[in-house]
Image (spheres, grey):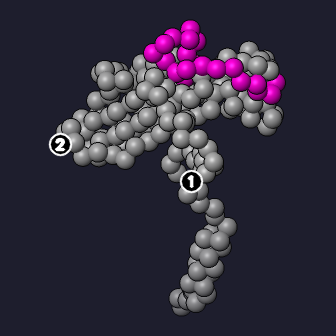
Amino acid sequence: MARNIPEIPTASMADIAFMLLIFFLVATTMDVDSGLARTLPPMPDEEQEQDDRIRERNIFTVRVDAQDRLLVEGQIADIRNLRDLAKEFIANPYDEAHLPEKEYQTIDFFGEVYIPRMAVISLQNHRGTSYGMYIQVQNELTGAYNELRDEISREQFGQRFDQLNIDQQAAVRSYYPMRISEAEPRQTGGR
């Protein structure tokens, strides 16, 4: 006589699978933060003088064409040199006439310092620029600011920028404010 093997009840399996699916959907967090962190500058006061137009020497132009070629200040450049070129422009360490104008400013923790008044990096990409090249350029420009901030933080406070307290970080940001102006992509100059 053969014995019957009892079956496993599967009627509630679909319900259990559905409950697990709901649980994981509710309990899982999805990071959707992608892109570049940028803070827009505040709107200028209506009373602000029109004399705030930026002079040519205060603008560092960076262009990327449809073939991912990099032009810095009108000259073909290599992405590996972009960070150093940007750092020299932003800091203007020797107060050179072709680099941003400098003036004395009073900054918390630093006192009166002689720093560039309005160093702006102007970035323009062609519509055909690859996303990889766009991100590389952004990384190098942001890296230039980060390295300068780290250098001045170590010099003034003996710590990296990310180790400073909020007030010290604000002072360092005042010393080297990140000013990257991104122009509308163009369709000229390539494919």
Name the residue nearer the viewer: 70 or 111.
Answer: 111
Task: Determine the image quadrant of residue 30.
Answer: bottom right
In the image, residue 185 sits, relative to residue 88, either above or below, namely below
Task: Determine the image quadrant of residue 173.
Answer: top right
Give the residue type at disc 2: Arg
Q: Position of residue 130 (x, y in %)?
A: 32, 41
- The secondary element bearing badge 1 is classed as loop
Q: Report whether residue 135 is seen.
A: yes
Image position of 131 (left or right of 15): left
Give the residue type at disc 1: Asp
Q: Which residues are magenta?
A: 90-109
Q: Quadrant of the C terminus?
A: top left
Q: Quadrant of the N terminus?
A: bottom right
Q: Position of residue 35 (x, y in %)?
A: 50, 48
Q: Report whether residue 159 is seen.
A: no
- Residue 147, magenta (yes or no): no
Spatial CA distance of label 1 from label 2 is 32 Å
Image position of 176 (left or right of 53): right
Q: Which residue is mark 2?
A: 191
Image position of 72 (left or right of 106): left
Q: Which residue is mark 1?
A: 33
Name the residue nearer the viewer: 10 or 87.
Answer: 87
In the image, residue 97 sits, relative to residue 39, either above or below, namely above
Q: Position of residue 137 (x, y in %)?
A: 42, 33
In primary-sequence order, the first of circles 1 and 2 is 1
Using a 10 Å C-alpha cutoff, classify the residue at mark 1 as few (fewer than 14 neighbours), some (14 to 19) or many (20 or more): few
Name the residue nearer the viewer: 169 or 17.
Answer: 169
Q: Residue at x 58, y 78 (%)?
A: 17
Q: What main secondary structure does the magenta stretch of the protein show?
A: loop
